[in-house]
Every structure is written in C-alpha cells, then in structure tokens.
Amino acid sequence: MTSLSVEMLAADAVEPITSAGNAQLGIAVLAGIAVIVLLITKFKMHAFLALTIGSLALGSFAGAAPAKTIASFTAGLGSTVAGVGVLIALGAILGKLLADSGGADQIVDTILAKASRRSMPWAMVLIASIIGLPLFFEVGIVLLIPVVLLVAKRGNFSLMRIGIPALAGLSVMHGLIPPHPGPLVAIDALGANLGVTLALGVLVAIPTVIIAGPVFSRYAARWVDIEAPEKMIPQRPSEDLDRRPGFGATLATILLPVVLMLVKALVDIVVDDPEQGLQKVTDVIGSPLIALLAAVIVGMFTLGRAAGFSKGRLSTTVEKSLAPIAGVLLIVGAGGGFKQTLIDAGVGQMILDFSEDWSIPALLLGWLIAVAIRLATGSATVATISAAGLVAPLAADMSTSHAALLVLAVGAGSLFFSHVNDAGFWLVKEYFGMSVGQTVKTWSVMETIISVVSLAFILLLSLVL
C-alpha cells in the first residue's frame, strides 16, 4: 500500500470534524458543490480557487470549526499532491518529448499511410488511444485535433467521422486507464491493485471506445455535418526537424510504463510472495513512479536524441513541459482537499447509511456519485477523486478484482455528460468550430455513451470475476 493510501485511511479513521446529522450534511454537500459550480460557471473563477472556497463553505454549512475545515483541506491537498504530483510531472515531460521530437507525428503518419478510407475512423481511435496513454486529456486534444483537422481536410471526410473516434480514444484513456491522475488517485484511495486495475481497464476500454468512437461517429456525422475550419488548421509541430524518431522506438517508449506495470501485476498474481526476489524487483520497476521515470529517461534517447536534440534542447524541453502543469497540480490537489473535507465531515458514513437503505450495489453507487460530482463541477478528475474518497469504506472488504472494478466504475461516472462547466467542452467546441448546441449533440453525447457503456461492461465483469 502506498503512503498516500495509508494517509487517506488514517484520515478516514479520525473523528468527524462536525457532529451534524445526515440531513445537515446532505445540505452542506449540495451547498458546497453549488458554490464550486457557481464560482466556475457564473464568475469564471479558476477551479483551484473555486474548490478551495467550496471546501471552506462545505465545512461552514456542516457546522465544523473553521480551523478543522482548513486542517482537513490542507491535509487532503498535501497527501494528494504527494501521491500523484511526481507522476503528473513525469507524464508531462514524456508528452512534451513526444510532441517536440516528432514522435507523435511519426505514429500518426505511419498508421494513416496504411489505413484505407473506410478504416480511417478505426485508425483515429488507435492513434488517439496510443497517444493518450501517457498524455493528459487536454494535452492529447491539443496534440491530436490539429492532426484530425488535417486528415479531415485532405481526405475530404466529415469532421465528426474522424474527430469523434479520436476524442473517444483520448477520453476513455483519461477516465479509465492509469497512469492518468484520476484513476491513480482512485486506486490509492480505494486501496486497489494498480496492475489489476490497468488490465481490467484495458478490457473495458476496448469495446467502450469502439461503440463511442467509430460506431457513434456515423450518427454524429449525420447530426452535425461540418468541415474542418480553415483558421484552426495549423502547421504541424515537427516540420522544422531534420529527422524524427522511428515508429517502433516511439511506440515502445510510450508503451514502456504500461508494460512495466502489467509485468508487476502478472508477477503479483503468479508468484504472490512479497519476499521472493523476482516480486521484489517487479514491485520496484512496476511502480508508477519508476515506470514513468524509466519511460522519460528512455524517451530522452529514443525521442529527443533521435530527433537531433542537443543536451541543451532536451533540458529546455523538460523545463517547458513543467510550467503548464502547475494549474493541473493545484486543481488535482484542491480536489483532494475537497474530498478530504467531505470525508472528515462524515459524508462517507452518510453515504454508507444511505446506500444500506437503498440497497444499491457498490459499483453502481460509486458511478452515481461520480456522475453527480461530474455534472456539478465539470471536472472528471475532481469527480473521480471526490467519489473515490466517499466510497472508500465500501472497498475495505472487497476482493482485489472488485476493488479494481470500483475504481473503474468511479472513473466511468466521472466522464458522464461533459457540458459548459468543463474545459474540455470549450476546447472541442473552439477547435472544431461548432456552436454550443452542436457540441452538446456530439461531444457531450459521446462522453455519456462512454460513461454508460463502460459501466455496463464493468457490471458484466463483476458477475464473472
């Protein structure tokens, strides 16, 4: 168990910061979420500040002493950043190396050169899923949408026929597959096994991305038949390079952390002896930090040096990759602080009390809570972090596979119906040159399909495992 999950369990075990009853707590939760939503949507406040103020408001409405609320929020923020901060930074470095070296272009060009017109939507799903493994969702959008626009323009495709599969690939990776921040934090909060979660996540992701991507894109293209907007088609990022990395080397670099994590999971299952030498080694190299660090170090040679980067340019690339993630780190940390405030106020016990009365299965309950927070805050990561904290007590007596499925259920709920309070909504709208209504009919519906379809497969797996 990681230090983050230990700290979370310790935090869960303390006395609640308030003695409010379930009714007052329920109102406090709704009020706290309402404050966050109003600040983000109405007053256009940054999510970090909105989550901070919303956490303080939640504590106040629940009748907690301000000092206790502040302590809960800062403890949650600190433990969350301590747990995933380094991973976020390493992921950003790998993503920047991938973009600046031309490695991403190499993968795109190689696959598209082999794809027929009929198979192009499937090629876009494959590209987005591969590229989306180490990248944050927003980085993936910025990297891939220009490619989507170029393919649609040059091949005379409907923009939705090409764009929806790419967006589906990115979104599914973001919500279900570690090492993305949301799933990683949920794994820590629920004490789930990372390798098992990764394996089951891939199993759920494949049919989900097919249905929400290539299949749904046929209908989306009929509902919103638009061409790629000229003003949004930029120059490709790596055309100034004399050379770029090979396809095999780039693909191997991207998949390295995933392979290392899967190896650890397989050894854990087969060997199942923490004192055995092989398992000790795989426990180290398969940990998210070492796996991502290994990919970054390898990427400096297979991506950076292969593209002709000098030592100075490699250093500059790493430096530039870290500045943009300051906001991501703060939002993720504040989401952890909000989650810890919820837990310390006793909301977790309230949810347990309600769930006993409702007789709702734990997987469905985790999904529903994440859906509610996603609709309220617009952030998939905040929804995952908060919902995972609330349902953590339910995972205490679960098997390894069901704890992993609970992580996936929470991740699936966090993707439900992206709308105007989600930054991704506006990114897609602006890049594709759509109106708000068109974005809802395509992007928002696609996100909902991903959420519902993945839940269906998760529930089916729970019956088998």
Image: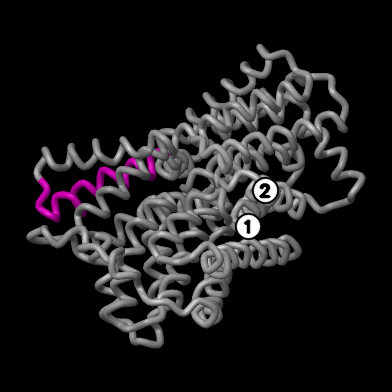
Task: Indicate whether 11 appears above or below 216.
Answer: above
Q: Position of residue 35 (x, y in %)?
A: 66, 34
Report how far apart the C-alphas of labels 2 and 1 lie in the structure. Answer: 8 Å
Pointer 1: what residue? Answer: 416
Apparent side of residue 55 relative to residue 142 in the rendered image (left or right)? right
- Which amino acid lies under the numbered mark 1 shown in the image of this protein? Phe
Contact between marks 2 and 1 (CB within 8 A): the answer is yes
Q: Give the residue drawn at x 36%, y 60%.
A: 131
> What label does residue 370 carry, if any?
2
Q: Is residue 273 visible?
A: no
Between residue 229 and residue 122, name the one nearer to us.
229
Q: Is residue 181 visible?
A: yes
Q: Which residues are magenta?
A: 289-309
The quadrant in which the N terminus is found is: top right
Q: Quick one: SS at disc 2?
A: helix
Q: Position of residue 209 (x, y in %)?
A: 53, 69
Apparent side of residue 404 relative to residue 286 in the rendered image (left or right)? right
